């Protein structure tokens, strides 16, 4: 650790590609984020960065286009219009009482 002329400790300078970004949050949102971050043993910055990055990737993936030729498109469209008959296992599962109703 380096020390300044006043004797206070300063962090060593490291090459870093991170940039500072400032947001304004309601206190209730910060309290919620801090609580969730503590559960994951993360600090606020790491938690927000992780959540923000996941949301951004999910948003972009939702917009992804998957090019298909006419044959593939027709197959997918026909499958959507005519779903398969339920299997015996699917029928049995549909008859079961949900866990939250037991």
Image (cartoon, helix red, strand yellow):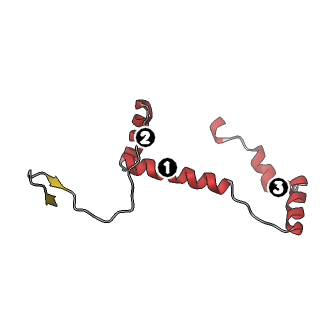
The N terminus appears in which quarter of the rendering?
A: bottom left
Mark in the foreground, 2 or 1? 2
Q: Which mark is residue 51?
A: 1
Residue for badge 2: 23
User: How many angstroms separate mark 1 from mark 3 (CA)?
Assistant: 40 Å
Q: Give me the residue at 73% from left, 60% from top.
A: 65
Dot placed on the residue nearer the N-terminal end, 3 or 2 = 2
In-image side of 68 versus 99 (left or right): right
Q: Looking at the rendering, which quadrant does residue 96 occupy?
A: top right
In-image side of 76 versus 3 (left or right): right
User: How many angstroms separate mark 3 from mark 2 (CA)?
Assistant: 53 Å
Residue for badge 3: 88
The C terminus appears in which quarter of the rendering?
A: top right
Rendering coords of residue 20 (x, y %):
38, 50
Q: Which mark is residue 59?
A: none
In-image side of 56 versus 28 (left or right): right
SS at mark 1?
A: helix
Badge 3 vs badge 2, beta-carbon distance below 8 Å: no
């Amino acid at each position: 650790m380096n020390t300044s002329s006043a004797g206070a400790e300063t962090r060593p300078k490291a090459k870093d590609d991170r940039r500072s970004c400032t947001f304004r949050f309601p206190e209730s949102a910060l309290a919620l984020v801090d609580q969730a971050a503590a559960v994951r043993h993360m600090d606020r910055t790491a938690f927000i960065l992780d959540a923000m990055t996941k949301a951004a990737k999910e948003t972009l993936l939702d917009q992804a286009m998957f090019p298909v030729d006419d044959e593939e498109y027709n197959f997918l469209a026909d499958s959507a219009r005519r779903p398969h008959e339920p299997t015996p296992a699917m029928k049995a599962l549909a008859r079961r009482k949900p866990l939250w109703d037991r």
